[in-house]
Amino acid sequence: MSNVVDLAGFQCPVGSMAMHSVYGLVEVFSQEGWMRGVLYEHHEELSLAHESDDVIFAEHIEMREAWVHVRELTEADLAKDIENLRKRGQFLFDTVD
């Protein structure tokens, strides 16, 4: 008889942050075998047709859920991943000098 170690539970556990090629930075909220439930931000640009001239940009941001295979995720290196997201225009926070 031998003990089998299930590696699925060790990769991207619940509560961890990870990167996904489509969703960007995600938070793992659930796991079932090799599948992970992830939360990600979905941005939708809003029409400015009826806004004043002072409004330059408006968007609606909501949290969405998706199930993905753990192989689609890479463990997040937050400093590096945030810089990559900023360069791609997906992270708009900028530091004040």
Image (spheres, rainbow, N blue to C red):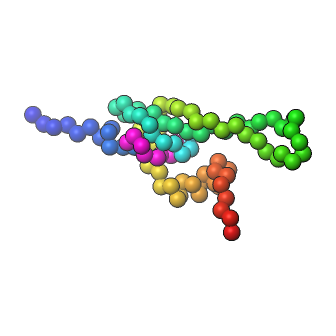
* Residue depicted at x 34% and y 31%: 33
Query: Which of these two is toward me, 35 or 92?
Result: 92
Q: Position of residue 3 (x, y in %)?
A: 16, 37
In this rendering, would 34 be left or right of 59? left
In this rendering, would 37 be left or right of 25? left
Query: Which of these two is toward me, 72 or 30?
Result: 30
Instruction: Name, please, the residue furthest toward the left.
Output: 1
* Residue depicted at x 64% and y 48%: 90
- Quadrant occupied by the C terminus: bottom right
* Residue depicted at x 89% and y 42%: 52
Instruction: Name, please, the residue furthest toward the bottom.
Output: 97
Q: Position of residue 39 (x, y in %)?
A: 52, 37
Tell me if residue 96 can be seen.
Answer: yes
Q: Is residue 16 a member of the stretch shown in magenta?
A: yes
In this rendering, would 52 be left or right of 85? right
Tell me if residue 88 can be seen.
Answer: no
Number of residue marks: 0
Identify the magenta region.
13-20
- Quadrant occupied by the N terminus: top left
Query: Which of these two is toward me, 12 or 71?
Result: 12
Q: Position of residue 58 (x, y in %)?
A: 76, 41
* Residue depicted at x 23% and y 39%: 5
Residue 2 occupies quadrant: top left
Q: Is residue 53 above or below residue 87?
A: above
In this rendering, would 62 be left or right of 48? left
Q: Position of residue 92 (x, y in %)?
A: 67, 52
